[in-house]
Amino acid sequence: MAAQSALARAFDSDLWWSFKRSPVTVVSAIVALACILGAVLAPWIAPHNPFDLASLNLIDAFKPPAWTGDGDATYPLGTDDQGRDVLSAIMYGARVSLLVGICAVLFATILGIAIGLVAGYVGGTVDSVLMRIADIQLTFPSILIALLIDGIVRAALPREVHDRVALFVVIFAIGISAWPAFARTVRGSTLVERNKEYVLAARVIGVSPLRIMASHVLPNVLGPVLVIATLGLGGAILTEATLSFLGVGVPPTQPSLGTLIRIGNDFLFSGEWWITIFPGVALIAMVLSVNLLGDWLRDALNPKLR
Amino acid sequence: MAEQIVAGPTAAAFAAATEAARDAGPTALPAFAHAADAGPMLEAEELARHFDVSRPLLQRLFAGEARRILRAVDGVSFSIPKGTTLSLVGESGCGKSTVARLVVGLYPPTRGRVIFDGQDLAQARADSAQRRRMQMIFQDPYASLNPRWRVQDIIAEPIRAFGLVTDRGAQRDRVAQLLTQVGLSPLDGEKFPHEFSGGQRQRISIARALSSNPEFLVCDEPTSALDVSVQAQILNLMKALQRDLGLTYLFISHNLAVVRQISDRIGVMYLGRIAELAPAETLFTAPRHPYTRALMEAIPDLDMTGRKRIPVGGEVPSPISPPPGCPFHPRCPLANERCRAEVPALLPARGTPESVVACHAVEEGRDHIEAPLAVAAALS
């Protein structure tokens, strides 16, 4: 009964109403959902397995999309130089892109919330030190930090070890460059909440600061965090694609959308445009739909715009 | 050092004053006399709290400024016998809310100390069995309840924090009982705070405060955000609870009518100090401090219909740079050289020894009780 009423409340909420009233949001939600489902379910619904070397045949290489004259219906979006199905490669690539993006944003969110809560609630010197660190962090572009960390790890670890941890390195590099945005927002909201009387009431009772932060302050500062996380997801996916395009991102054994675009880029001028255009379109669709959702969420959660 | 602390009334003078008030007690204050032998619930001795409101160090160095110290509370002493209500009244910024927060330990005092039932407050706060005995009710019913929590969780928070009732079912029963006690329905526990009106929220605040079975409640302007009719309901509820549970209240307000209804004794604060501390009826029938008399003059009253209203003139000086001597002297018609130089101590007033008054004019007999306030006229 509780679950049912929660569902009913969700469909009756202001959020749902503003969602239904915005066609752009509905479309981007559908696109985002399609991207996510395609990525998550790739092993089951993709027409081919692009990483199964046994099934690859070089005769099938450079097949154009199915609707062109030379196309083959088994490869709807054509094949690349190795004879891999572009559609399947995109679905598998989106999996890697999404995984890196979501993990990086989660990492940045958790780090940012923890630092922001402590800085805002404790205040004083702790606050100043943490926020100056965030300021310093913000002066470095995220790509630069990611390149730096990747370079260090690449130099420090042997190649096969590096390939195994490369995914985590990218997640860490993107996450670490994104936390200041979360920390600043959470700190700002925490400064407001910590002087509210319900926090004072908990302090009078003698509830420990950690518990107050977790059970009183945190639930009340999460709204803006959700918005930044959604907008940050698009950014993280793009950063990962940039790194992979530059060849310092995920290992070539697990190509992401960025890797696919880089591979296809080599064949762009020889006429095989589909190898790079389709992964690019998929990337744009994914990032754009997530960003539009984030924009809508920001407006929907902003009481001043209601 | 730029900070200069003017010595307040001495503790000895205060003790004598309290003694005098206690002697006068039995006739005017049966509740006070009844509980007096048990020792006070709470005592404040020379309590002070200063806030550093200086600009950041670098800016200060460039501008060549000294530190700016805001003396929110500057030497306040009082004691609250068990089972009674002491109210502190005063204009905005006189430090009354700061006193409330000092008394429950939300701020550490800069100077002086608070004694809770014979024990130093810092020690009492460290012991959860003692901490349970004090609770606070806040001014803003819209900010004092966590908007994300259900009412039953809000009320049960102290119960859980102190581990008073561990069984879930018993906790629910206790919450239902508390809701009934403050005049709400036990079913309201399922709801969220935004589903209630201001008065109902204040009832929830009271229920939360009561849930740890406290003996001492600090009420920081609990009615000032409410409609007049709702104010009366909340005050009646608080009085009933005091009668039934034997609670001791420190009541902070700027509303003299509210204070008159609920108090046994009233302290009038001005610029971080107590100007006059007297039994409630004495304060209203025979106000002694020129400031108290000006405040009384400002209360609307039927007998005054048609009479020209005389406002209290001037502004409260800044607590960052308070005037030397008596803090009220720039607005006081009775001020003379001594008032401008010397801080008055709280002493029993001539004629009404149950009131303690910090005024040189009262001490010297320069005030004229009979004259119906040339004071206010001079103020305007």
Image: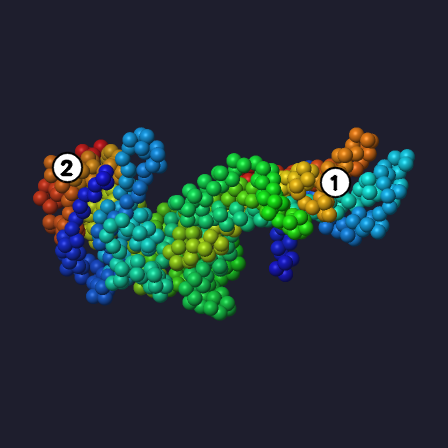
Type of amino acid at the residue the image marks with label 1 = Leu
Q: Nearer the viewer, residue A117 or B270?
A: A117
Q: Which residue is under mark 1?
A: A260
Measured Cα–Cα span from mark 1 to mark 2:
84 Å
- Crowding at dot 2, Cα within 10 Å, few <14 / some 14-19 / many 20+, comes out as some
Mark toward the viewer: 1 or 2:
1
- Are tags 1 and 2 found on a single chain? no
In the image, residue B57 sits, relative to residue A194, either above or below, namely above
Give the x, y percent position of residue B103. Answer: 30, 54
Q: Which mark is residue B79?
A: none
Vertical relation: B93 (above or below) B195: above
Q: Is residue A81 visible?
A: yes
Position of the N terminus of chain B, as image quadrant, is: top left
What element does badge 1 sit on? helix
Using the rendered view, name the quadrant where residue A249 is placed.
top right
- Left or right of B351 in this view: A96: right
Where does residue B168 sit, x and y in percent of width and height?
Answer: 50, 67
Q: Quadrant of residue A146?
A: top right
Disc number for residue B340: 2
Which residue is depicted at the point 24% across and 43% down? Answer: B270
Residue drawn 52% across the image and 38% down it: A138
The answer to whether marks 1 and 2 mark residues whose Cβ atoms lie closer than 8 Å is no
Residue type at the position of mark 2: Arg
What's the residue at 31%, 41% (across, down)? B52
Q: Position of residue A120 (x, y in %)?
A: 44, 46
Q: Is residue A260 left or right of residue B171?
A: right
- B209 and A89: which one is in front? A89
Instruction: Tell me the quarter of the image containing the C terminus of chain B.
Output: top left
**In this picture, is A159 found above or below A80?**
below
Residue B352 visible in the picture: no
